Image: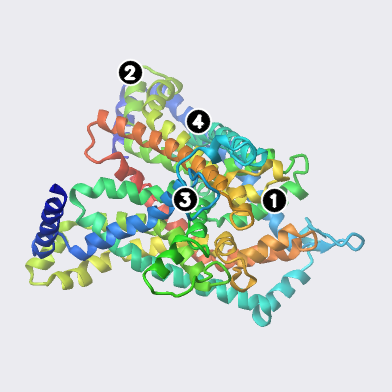
Amino acid sequence: MSAPAERNTALTRLGTWWANPWGQPRFLVIFTWAYVLWSLVPVAVAVLFGFNDGRSRSTWQGFSLRWYIQDPDLSVLHDPSLRDALLQSLKLAGLTMLIATPLGVALAIGLARWRGRGARPANFLMLFPLVTPEIVMGVSLFLVFVYLFGFIQLGTQAQLLGHVTFTVSYVVIVVRGRLFAIGREYEEAAMDLGASQWQAIRMVLLPMLAPAIWASLMIAFAISIDDFVITAFLMGDQSSATIPVKLYSAARAAPSPALNALASILLFASMLAIGIALLVMRRSRKKEGAKQSAVEDFARLEI
Amino acid sequence: MCGRGSSRADRNVSKPADERGAVGEGRWLWPSFALPGVVWLLILFVTPFYALIAMAMGITDPIFGDTLPVWNPLHWNYATFGDVLGEIFTGQLGVVFLRTLVYVVAATALSLLIGYPVAYYVARHAGRYRVLLLLLIIAPFWINYLMRMLAWVNLLATDGYVNQILMFTGIFDAPREWLVGKPETVVLGLVYGYVPFLILPLFAALDRIDQRVIEAARDLGASPAQAFFRVTLPLSYQGMLAGCVIIMLPMFGDYYTATLLSGSPKTNMIAKLIEQNINASAGGNTGAALTIILMVFVGLLMTYYLFSVARATREARS
């Protein structure tokens, strides 16, 4: 009984909304929401089919965890090639995060405070990896590991060094924004009160940078786990394939819902990392009573 | 940083000895923070570029037939480079280069057409949905690119939802093979892949525009359309340019989109040839030469982006 009535009021409301000349520009509203649907629904469908009970990726046959854990041969848990890709991705992203963050934080502090002659070239050097097409970096790193640094094996070692190299600059960008916002006043106040330079850094600057450091840990993880080009070029053999590499090689050749499941796990991992980064940034924002939401700051990072 | 001068001066008055120490310490303190990162980048970012050049100027081993780099600039062999350049102007390589250019320009133009209204709406009219919309627009950034392509591989399959819907609505009688050598699929894939990266800088630029400037235009008698075309649009040129550069750079180096969505040599982009050459034992020189040419080709875009980021940094600093 109530359903048609509800639809009626919804329709009326839609009609009023459409006819209201003072409302928001209607074309833009519809266009924007259509864009959001277009950008996210295909991915949602792909995630959904990771939970399909059958083998098809276009006919829904009921919900199951078959492709995640249940299937004894083909699920992510039991197919060694898929499981190894997942582990390799996590290992690489975890290590990259742990190396790139301290390196990037120190570089950000150094570049933000250093006023000497070398500061400008160093700053440009830091920005270069951000603008270099990944394939150029991938090819160059591949060549240098094969022909010059022969003591470094292609595979996990080379991949880790490559990942850190392109992640560092992102860490710098994230931390630097916070450094500029803080300014030097707090450290100088601490030093006026008798702290040494080191104490000022350790006891004033680093605690104030903590939210940015947490956020950059998470961002480094997410960037590393998402990388495809450099990972693929520096891959030794199939044992160092990551999830994106698996997606690339199997999407056309051997697609199965297990591939969707694997991709979904990657999605959940990076969403978790980015969610944590956003929450950390939001909490520090709230403490300081800033008006803008963390999401807006995130959108303005322009990375 | 305006506070710095005054507090220095204060300390100078009270503790001159301490100030001398701070300056002496300060000279090496900040560079030493930057040192590990700079050294890392010198070894693993700058040195690899030299390896790239050495490989492009390298030789083919006369016995084994594989390619080797030549490290000494005095012995560089320019033959491969010349061959590749010749092929670009006269042969098959030129076709691939041209195709890459066409795909990238088409995809960028489409991205701008799609991205501008979205960025405009979110920046100026979204109201209470602003944060939610921003969150949804940022989301694709953190969804793996290949997963987003995989999603379309599923949808565009012969029995996939796109064909099902098109046949259900009667637009097509028979399923269409979207995934075999269709340039339009590749261009749409590129748009789908990169448009979020264009929307964000555009959003930032549109958001920065002072609302009062537009109100002033309206007060002075401009219609909404005139206010948009003569005030908002010109003020957002910088953002449009930045957004286009940001997506064109990775598009020129993209080989996976075409491979996943078409898989045919007819839609290969230049980066695919690089990948194939580098992975073949005899193609090292050619692959490296192509990489350098690609880099010089996008050098203008890179320089523009580099300087605009550096300028933004200086503005944030002062």
Q: Amino acid at mark 4?
A: Leu
Of marks 2 and 3, which one's residue comes earlier in the chain? 3
Q: Is residue A235 visible?
A: yes
The kind of secondary structure element at disc 3 is helix
Residue at mark 4: chain: B
**Are labels 1 and 3 assigned to the same chain?**
yes
Q: Is residue A183 visible?
A: no
Residue at which label 4 appears: B29
Given residues B108 and B206, the one toward you in this image is: B108
Q: Quadrant of residue B253?
A: bottom right
Residue at which label 3 appears: A46
Disc 2/disc 3 C-alpha distance (Å): 59 Å
Other-residue count near label 3 (Cα within 10 Å), few / some / many at <14 / 14–19 / ≥20: many
Which colour scheme appears in the figure?
Answer: rainbow
Residue at mark 1: chain: A
**Are labels 4 and 3 assigned to the same chain?**
no
Disc 4/disc 3 C-alpha distance (Å): 51 Å
Other-residue count near label 2 (Cα within 10 Å), few / some / many at <14 / 14–19 / ≥20: few
The kind of secondary structure element at disc 1 is helix
